[in-house]
């Protein structure tokens, strides 16, 4: 999830195209290398020149430098853009699945390395799910099956395992009140996929003591 385009393009071309797909502003080879955080400046320029020769990248001389941008009219451009947006598409997919659940959670957010975009091939997709069951009560089989099915889908979509962090509303409040270390991670990284935005949800529990 840190560099989705590398799933199909494992060479330096992948990070370079990833940078160009994320912006419409022309960039110098040096800036692209810095943003790609892969390869050296010489290698990056070599990749850019080759991509420019295919027409997928536009090279424009500006003074003494050359600036590069993705040619979004190129037939291959949409494929590149699709690859660079895999992470958001994963989050959207998780949200759509949860919206179709028979038993709805009160909140769900992706957090951890997937949310930050710095995970590796073996990183889990961490998902906070706050449910409506009483603290200590066993979730229904329907709920268990829902979470299990989502985990299977996430693995098929991404090749990464889902790590579901399931809490009751009371359990979530207890985490907040106790200042559990994981709360800092939620505050920093959480990307909401179902229910109210994480900070709104957190503030409701903090000030309302878990009341809806």
Image (cartoon, helix red, strand yellow):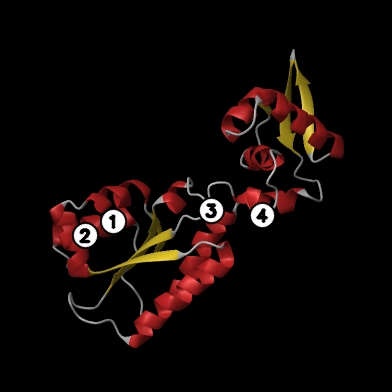
Disc marking residue 121: 3
| Residue 169, percent from left and from top | 22, 69
> Mark 2 = which residue?
204
Front of the two marks 4 and 1: 4
| Left or right, 161 with reference to 32 | left
Task: Please tell me whether mark 1 sits on a helix, a strand or a loop.
Answer: helix
**Residue to which mark 1 is pinned:** 200
In this rendering, the answer to whether 19 lies above or below 107 is above
Label 2, residues with CA under 10 Å away: few <14, some 14-19, many ≥20: some
Residue 110 at x, y = what percent? 40, 58
Q: Are marks 2 and 1 in contact (CB under 8 Å)?
A: yes
Instruction: Tell me which numbered mark, 4 or 1, is placed earlier along the sequence.
Output: 4
Relative to 53, say whether 155 is above or below: below
Residue at image mark 4: 82
Give the residue at x 63% y 38%.
19
Q: Is residue 61 left or right of residue 120?
A: right
Quadrant in the rendering for residue 131: bottom left
Q: Earlier in the sequence, mark 3 or mark 2?
A: 3
- Which residue is situated farthest in the front direction here? 122
Q: Dot 2 lies on which element?
A: helix
* Badge number at residue 99: none
Q: For the view shown, which residue lies furthest in the top direction? A: 64
Residue 22, image x and y in percent?
61, 41
Gap in Å between the C-alphas at discs 4 and 2? Answer: 36 Å
- Quarter of the image for the C terminus: give it: bottom left
Where disc 3 sits, the SS reads loop
Q: Earlier in the sequence, mark 4 or mark 2?
A: 4
Q: CA distance from mark 3 to mark 2?
A: 36 Å
Q: Earlier in the sequence, mark 1 or mark 3?
A: 3
Q: Gap in Å between the C-alphas at discs 2 and 1?
A: 6 Å
Name the residue furthest bottom. 141
């Amino acid at each position: 999830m840190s560099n989705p385009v590398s799933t199909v393009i494992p060479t330096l071309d992948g990070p370079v195209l990833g940078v160009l797909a994320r912006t419409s502003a022309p960039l110098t080879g040096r800036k692209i290398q810095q943003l790609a955080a892969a390869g050296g400046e010489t290698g990056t320029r070599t990749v850019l020149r080759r991509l420019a020769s295919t027409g997928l990248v536009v090279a424009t001389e500006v003074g003494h430098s050359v600036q590069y941008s993705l040619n979004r009219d190129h037939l291959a451009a949409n494929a590149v853009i699709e690859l660079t947006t895999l992470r958001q598409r994963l989050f959207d997919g998780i949200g759509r699945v949860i919206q179709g659940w028979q038993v709805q959670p009160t909140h769900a957010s992706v957090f951890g390395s997937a949310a930050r975009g710095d995970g590796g091939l073996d990183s889990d997709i961490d998902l906070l799910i706050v449910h409506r069951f009483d603290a200590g009560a066993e979730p229904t089989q329907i709920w268990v099956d829902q979470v299990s099915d989502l985990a299977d889908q996430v693995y098929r979509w991404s090749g990464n395992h889902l790590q579901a962090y399931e809490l009751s509303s009371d359990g979530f409040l207890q985490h907040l009140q106790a200042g559990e270390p994981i709360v800092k991670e939620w505050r920093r990284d959480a990307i909401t996929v179902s229910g109210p935005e994480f900070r709104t949800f957190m503030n409701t529990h903090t000030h309302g003591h878990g009341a809806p």
